[in-house]
Image: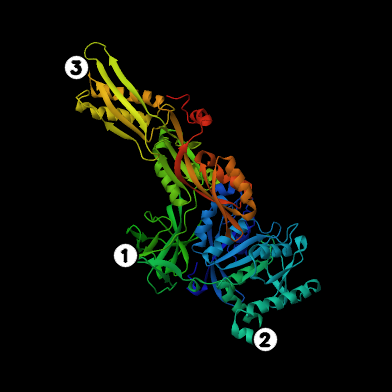
Amino acid sequence: MDTAPTPRIRNVALVGHGGSGKTTLAESLLHRAGVIARLGRVEDGTTVCDTEPEEIKRGMSLSLAVAPFEWTASDGESYKVNLIDTPGYADFAGAVDSALSVADLAVVVVSAVDGVEVGTEHVWRLCEEAGIPRLVFITKEDKQRADFHSVLDQLKSTFGSGFATLELPLGEEESFHGVADVLSDQGFEYESDGRHHAEPIPADVLDEEARLHEEIAEEIVSGDDDQLERYLSGDVPTADELERTLRHEVLDCLEFPVLVGSAATGVGIDRLADFICELGPSPADRPATALVAGDETEVLADPAGRPLAYVFRTVVDQFVGQLSMFKVLSGTIAGDDRLTNTTTDTEERLHGLFYLRGKEHLPAERVVAGDIAAVAKLSASPSGSALAPKGYPVTVPSPEPRPTAYALALRPLTQADDDKLSGAIQRLCAEDPSLAVERIEETAQTVLRGTGDTHLAVALERLSRKFGVNVTTEDVKVPYRETIVGSAEAEGKLKKQSGGHGQFAVVQLRVSPRERGAGSEFVDSIVGGAIPRNYIPAVEKGVDEAMANGGVNGFPVVDVRVECYDGKFHAVDSSDMAFRTAAALGLKEAMAKASPVVLEPISLLTVTVPDGFQGDVMGDLNSRRGRINGSASIGGGLHEVQAMVPTAEIQRYVLDLRSMTGGRGTFSAVHDHYDVLPSHLVEKVKKASGNGSGH
């Protein structure tokens, strides 16, 4: 593939709700550009962008895929378009974040059948927050129940003004055969090969097209004082003049062109490619933001500038190893260049640059500012890394990691799986930053966290396929703890005689509660040598071990003051081990007398939902033993609810909230404190934790 100059590069993310037709649209664009000879099908697993076995099995995109093509637009210029196909399912929204971090234009794909859906709202909000210019493509116009005007109304009612309807469909459903160009007042009829020819606009569309032309022209020129003055004086702007002004308004996110077509029949696909090239911004129009020595600055996409690359995705390939996809933010990078990871200060050699098109590798000698490429074996530069000349103190902000709201504990099937698990999981997390893993010593579990159940199911399938590690899963154990609310005294006594030296130790302990969260404390109050000084450390160790092993209910003991105030020893039969054992026995007995209680972790939950759902959410949180802290409107039709909720009650909350709000609700949860578990739940919790009736 030839190197394109920076002003002729277009980095375009296809975003939208799952099933809206993004991957099929990418396939149609590649086919119309002559990159592929025939259209693949998502259902058959034959598309360029969906190549992973997990994607083919489910018939949906699970990660982003890059598919570049060259296009000669209607203005006669040749462009390079880097298409970035993204998943639409909520569990894989992290891939959308990565795509938008390098895209200069988002094509929001909306189904003419299903209209604006939850995923449409989600990606629109992401683009809005990131300041990404947008273009809307209404696809599936050839399908039954397609309704272009209904979708247009939904867009305006959901997202407000600014939608510039540049095309109208000619026919609909099975009779969809062309489009009317609102700017040029022309009709375009399509042949079976996806090419079009101009025809007069049919009479049944003519009045609507003329009205729209006036509205769109007025809206476009209102953003340009000079053109507005000419327009008001009767000078009617040409289609080319309107398009030039519209391009600036698209860049400034003031106007959002709306196009229509069908990826299946090819109607409107070539015009979409034209508009991407002619209205979409180039990387030179949108400087990147970076921190240079801590100060925020703009990085211009200048091929002659200092080289700076941003790694936005890593992929583990079974044959090549780790592949890193990167965007050149500045300068020009050639094969075998050496750049330094600006975070770790590790030097990386960029050997064998190439462009990725799905799984196809297209060799590249050099990559200019604004372009997207890939390189193998950047082992020390995961997603989010910046690569620059040594000594250049620059960092590039990365998307915030998605909240890991769903978790499963992993149990390796064999010893061989156990040996490989840690390394394989780390590589899996490097490939997908939305995953996180931790070892919880308190419950002896290795826990994998992600954004939902499907996210983790796919991760475990990849763990097996790519790394040969097989695991079973179980629920994550809640880390309950135990303390006391009263004071008590008890004697721990060990007396054994079995020939030769025996074992003898007596320890008198007094236990009392400490303030919640203060930790446990051991106090030595021995006077008069009742227990020799050299045995006191053994007593303390016995107490500590007993606390860690679990109190009356079998959970680790916290926030208890243990005072050793008396005891007895034998000159021959006493030993460190005897005093450790006696101390443990004494603590268990004292705890039983001091009104033990089980403590459960409490999370601070922040839930964001559309205004109409706050009542349902608050009622649901109350049913989970939650205590509502507050509820307030935060603008944009959204409501925020804060509550303290037992962690055990929100293990599957991500799934329940999606169900309750139709996928529109989001939340974050952080551990806040421990509180007493209601007594009627203690036996249930002990059974679920495998503690039976106690120790």
At x 28%, y 15%, the residue is 495
The answer to whether 374 is drawn above or below residue 689 in the figure is below
The answer to whether 646 is drawn above or below residue 485 in the figure is below
Quadrant hosting residue 523: top left
Mark 3 vs 2, N-terminal side:
2
Q: Is residue 570 left or right of residue 674?
A: left
The answer to whether 348 is drawn above or below residue 643 in the figure is below
Mark 1 vs 2, N-terminal side:
2
Task: Name the secondary structure under disc 1.
Answer: loop
User: Badge 2: how crowded within 10 Å, few (<14), some, or many (20+)?
Assistant: few
Residue 550 percent location from the top left of the image: 39, 29
Which kind of residue does numbered mark 2 sit on? Leu
1 vs 2, front mark: 2
Which kind of residue does numbered mark 3 sit on? Val
Q: Residue furthest top?
A: 499
Mark 3 vs 1, N-terminal side:
1
Which kind of residue does numbered mark 1 sit on? Lys
User: Badge 1: how crowded within 10 Å, few (<14), some, or many (20+)?
Assistant: some
Q: Residue furthest bottom?
A: 233
Q: Report the label total.
A: 3
Residue 666 percent location from the top left of the image: 56, 51
Quadrant hosting residue 419: top left
Which residue was labeled with disc 1? 390
**Alpha-carbon span between mark 3 and mark 2:** 111 Å
Which residue was labeled with disc 2? 232
Which residue was labeled with disc 3? 572
Residue 61 percent location from the top left of the image: 57, 53
Task: Name the secondary structure under disc 3.
Answer: loop
**Alpha-carbon span between mark 1 and mark 2:** 57 Å
